[in-house]
Amino acid sequence: MTAMLNIKDLRAYYGQVQALHGLEFGLNEGSLTTLLGANGAGKTTTLRAICNMVRSTGSIEFDGASLNGRSTENIVRLGIAHVPQGRGTFTTMTVEENLQLGAITRKDKAGVVSDIERMYDHFPVLKERHTQQAGTLSGGEQQMLAVARALMLRPRLMLLDEPSFGLAPLIVRDLFKILGKINREDKVTILVVEQNAQLALELADKAYVIETGRIVMSGSAAEIANNEDVRKSYLGY
Amino acid sequence: MELFINQVLAGVATGAIYACMALAVVMIYQAIDHLNFAQGEMAMFSTFIAWQLMQWGVPYWWAFLLTLVFSFAGGIAIERALFKPLAKAPVLTNVAGFIALFAIVNSVAGLTWDFTIKQFPTPFGSSPFLGSQLISTHQAGMIGVTVGLLILLYLFFQFTRIGLAMRAAASLPESARLVGINTSWMIALGWGMASAIGAIAGILIAPVVFLEPNMMGGVLIYGFAAAVLGGLTSPLGAVVGGFLVGVFENLAGTYIPGVGNELKLPIALALIITVLVLKPAGLFGRPIVKRV
Amino acid sequence: MSAVDEVASDAPAVEAVPKKAMTLGLGASLVMLALLIIGPMFVKNFIVFQLTMLLIYALAVLALNILTGGSGQFSLGQSAFYAVGAYTSAILMEHFGVNYALTLPVAGIICFGFGFLFGQPALRLSGIYLALATFALAVAMPQLLKLGVFEHWTGGVQGLVVTKPDAPFGLPISQDRWLYYFTLTVAIGIYIASVNLLKSRSGRAFMAIRDNEIAASAMGVDVALYKTLAFGVSAGITGVAGGLGAIAVQFVAPDGYTITLAISLFLGMVVGGVGWLPGSIVGSAFIIFVPNIAEGISKGLSGAVFGVLLFLVIFLVPHGARQVAMVAQHMLGKLRKG
């Protein structure tokens, strides 16, 4: 099986500073993969490089087509949804407008309407607050809104940047349960970057470990979870 | 009392023009965080286009419509050619760019149509409105067109996809790109719309101030005052600010002894500085938090 | 979360210029000085007058450069300070019979105070807002000068005629030439003082504020004081330039100090290179000669020429004359080695 997303020799730069040093990995269609690593290892940069939000070199292929030189919005239009760190909520707009924005590139009006209802099924709290300004939502609710907004694109690949950040443990569990469901039922391929390694490894079927801009380990989530180095460095036991 | 009502109504009428200019200023400010010092000159140029079309025999409303189309396209062209490349340049460079644009447009208009003042027609006539002595039909027309424009803009931003996308691009460009919005074109669109709105202001005020290359100088400053008063981040605020400034200007000119015509402008400026110092976000704007 | 989302991450107001890059080397300075001293001996009086204006505007551009290039604050309102300086000199000379040379320090001090006071509200504004507030000041100034209350002193719309001073000690040179050398002396004095100011503790404080205001205050720089001080110094120098201008033109009137002047000075700074003090004279030459030449070709053309040239500067040499000078220096260096 060829990979849906294939990354080769990816190098990324912030000004003069190089953040990624020849990253290589791939994602299979339908997989749920997690990218683990410490602060500053290059996890966020990797996601940003996929969406061309940081200067990078190397090759990134999605469904066999190169993403190089495409603008962020064009990459998104291919069906790659990116839930950024900090969620990127349009705080001055209503919850419903945020969901509509997620589907702004879609032409099928009826489908959008029914998808909004589907999101309200996934996240009932969003339905309760659909006319409220998104900025008034709690952190957990905003994270759900961000995931729902990304799903409104009907993406084939979803990139999540630290979805658990700043959320209470119970809410994180809920959120991850929903991510698993989306992966299984809607066949959305998911790449999730996490500091909460334990939860991420429970959820994922495949994992990569990234250190100072390089992939240092890869395998099934179970293998990685049992690796002694990983346990010491990221799981804390 | 009659003088008072008269002055308020006249203020509302000129306020309508300030509201349009303020709206144009806010549209561009929302899109790129800069004040377009050339907004007035662009409006003046559009007004000349309308005048020229009418000279060639085009009926008023056709000329009006064609001018809007021309202004819209012109606004986009200016953004693409001159200001898109400056997107990441320091504020100072952008200010210099706007001033350069100001000088070029003013000068080209003067060279093309010379600096003598010209009459500009009004489709509303200038008889008393509904038999009342208080405002003329042209003033009523100014208010009517502005209010109509506002309603259209409101509907556009609230209920159309492009309107939603433009709002998203203005509030959080990065997130907007992540939902697939081409933010760069949204900025160009903002310029086009601002330019067209400015054209409306110019065409409406021209019968009052007469058509000449420097006609918009004072109007733009009132537009700035209105935008600042209402809050540079709020289109609604800009409009309310426009009407308030118009009324304030007329009342001050009438009732404060020694103000008269020559001090009207400094009063608008004092207003700008006062608002900026006391409440920089304006009446309706969102406060801006700065990060190191 | 919402508070963080609304954080504005602005582009910098002004690009940082390293302190060393703000001045000229000793050799280049001496060559320039020699040119300025010898040049006017061989030209007609009218050209001498134009050179005097060149120096005066260069001073005004230099003043703006200290404010913007030094402390990172904007001003589109320098014409207001220039006007106050000009009127101070004119009124002192014509109403009180004060010697022209003595009016200049008074003009400088009054404008310093005026600028310092204006700097107080300006403290709370930055970038584009400050540009707008100062713009407002510049537009208001001619109207204020026309006010009936001050008419006895200012001459209202008519303005005041100023007597041109003769060369002292019976020196056998024309009034124009004398005024040129007088202006040159003042200009050199102010230039040297400005260079030293920027090298001093205060200058470092200015630049710290320009580069990062919050960090500067964290380092213990009294931001409020230095920002208003920069305004004061800038206004003071502009006032002296205004006073010299009144003496050279022999006339002051409200319409001589419109927003156009403020904008010209701003453009002069951009063309000369923001933060590069020697560029002030290049900028000054730009704003004096370009309109003259353009108007000579066709009336009303100067705006277009001005604007187009300015866009060329912005796109091709965004650092103005400083960039040209640096490239030239680099090439010279290569030639010497090669």
Image: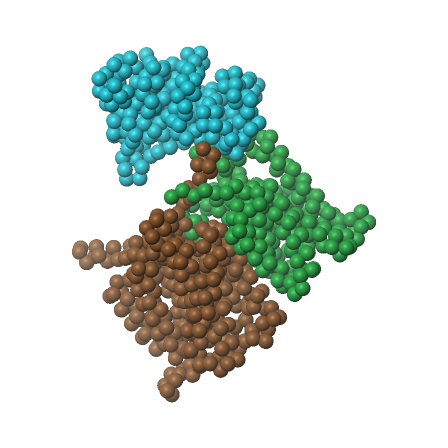
Chain colours: A cyan, B green, C brown
The answer to whether residue B87 is seen in the rendering is: no
Q: Residue at x 37, y 55 (%)?
A: C222
Residue C286 horizontal/vertical position (percent): 41, 62
Quarter of the rendering containing residue C169: bottom left
Q: Quarter holding the N terminus of chain B? A: bottom right
Q: Does C101 sit left or right of A195 as displayed?
A: right
Residue B200 horizontal/vertical position (percent): 63, 46
| Viewer-proximal residue among C184 and A32 | A32
Residue B69 horizontal/vertical position (percent): 60, 41
Above or below, C120 against B193 in this view is below
Q: Quarter holding the C terminus of chain B? A: top left
Q: Residue at x 33, y 70 (%)?
A: C188
Above or below, A108 against B218 in this view is above
Residue A42 horizontal/vertical position (percent): 30, 29
Q: Does B10 sit left or right of C250 as displayed?
A: right
Q: Residue at x 46, y 45 (%)?
A: B83
Q: Residue at x 56, y 73 (%)?
A: C154
Give the residue at the far bottom of this rendering: C170
Above or below, B272 against A201 in this view is below
